[in-house]
């Protein structure tokens, strides 16, 4: 049975424990009263979103550097 939403503060603590303090998922789950699966899920989502953000930032940089030209119907990539 679901307990409802997890407060953002607790999700930040999960990320802090796992990424900064290198505490295992099992120890993190015990310390924060979460399931081990939730701890792993939060970390996986964070890592997935980090990759998406890096890809988006790269595409924005390409547009700013005129490597990509966007028109109303097409996207053209300049090769140099």
Image: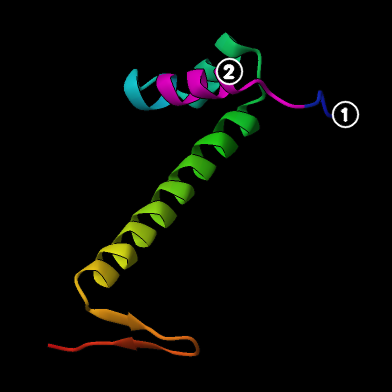
Residue under circle 2?
Answer: 10
Residue under circle 1?
Answer: 1
Q: From mark 1 to mark 2, how far is it between C-alphas?
A: 19 Å
Relative to residue 54, is residue 2 drawn left or right? Answer: right
Residue 35, compared with residue 71, is above or below; it is: above
Neighbours of disc 1 within 10 Å: few (<14), some (14-19), many (20+): few
Q: Is residue 44 shown in magenta?
A: no
**Residue 14 coordinates in the image, percent (x, y):** 51, 22
> Which quadrant would the C terminus be assigned to in this image?
bottom left
Residue 47, compared with residue 63, is above or below; it is: above
Relative to residue 6, is residue 31 drawn left or right? Answer: left
**Residue 24 coordinates in the image, percent (x, y):** 45, 23
Task: Tell me which residue sits at (56%, 17%) in the image.
Answer: 9
Q: Residue furthest top?
A: 31
Q: Is residue 9 shown in magenta?
A: yes
Task: Tell me which residue sits at (51%, 16%) in the image.
Answer: 27
* Mark nearer the viewer, 1 or 2: 2
Task: Tell me which residue sits at (64%, 31%) in the image.
Answer: 38
Residues at marks 1 and 2 touching, judged by CB atoms closer than 8 Å: no
Q: Nearer the viewer, residue 9 or 44?
A: 9
Q: Nearer the viewer, residue 51 or 56?
A: 56
Q: Residue furthest left?
A: 80
Relative to residue 34, is residue 80 drawn left or right? Answer: left
Quadrant assignment, res 55: bottom left
Magenta highlight: main SS: helix
Q: Secondary structure at mark 1?
A: loop
Quadrant assignment, res 65: bottom left
Task: Tell me which residue sits at (33%, 22%) in the image.
Answer: 20
Neighbours of disc 2 within 10 Å: few (<14), some (14-19), many (20+): few
Residue range in magenta is 5-16
Residue 49, compared with residue 69, is above or below; it is: above
**Residue 16 coordinates in the image, percent (x, y):** 41, 21
């Amino acid at each position: 049975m679901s307990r409802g939403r997890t407060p953002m503060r607790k999700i930040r603590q999960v990320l802090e424990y796992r990424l900064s303090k290198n505490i295992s998922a099992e120890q993190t789950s015990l310390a924060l009263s979460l399931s081990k699966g939730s701890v792993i899920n939060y970390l996986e989502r964070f890592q997935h979103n980090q990759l998406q953000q890096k890809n988006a930032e790269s595409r924005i940089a390409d547009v700013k550097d005129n490597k990509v030209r966007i028109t109303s119907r097409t996207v053209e990539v300049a090769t140099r």
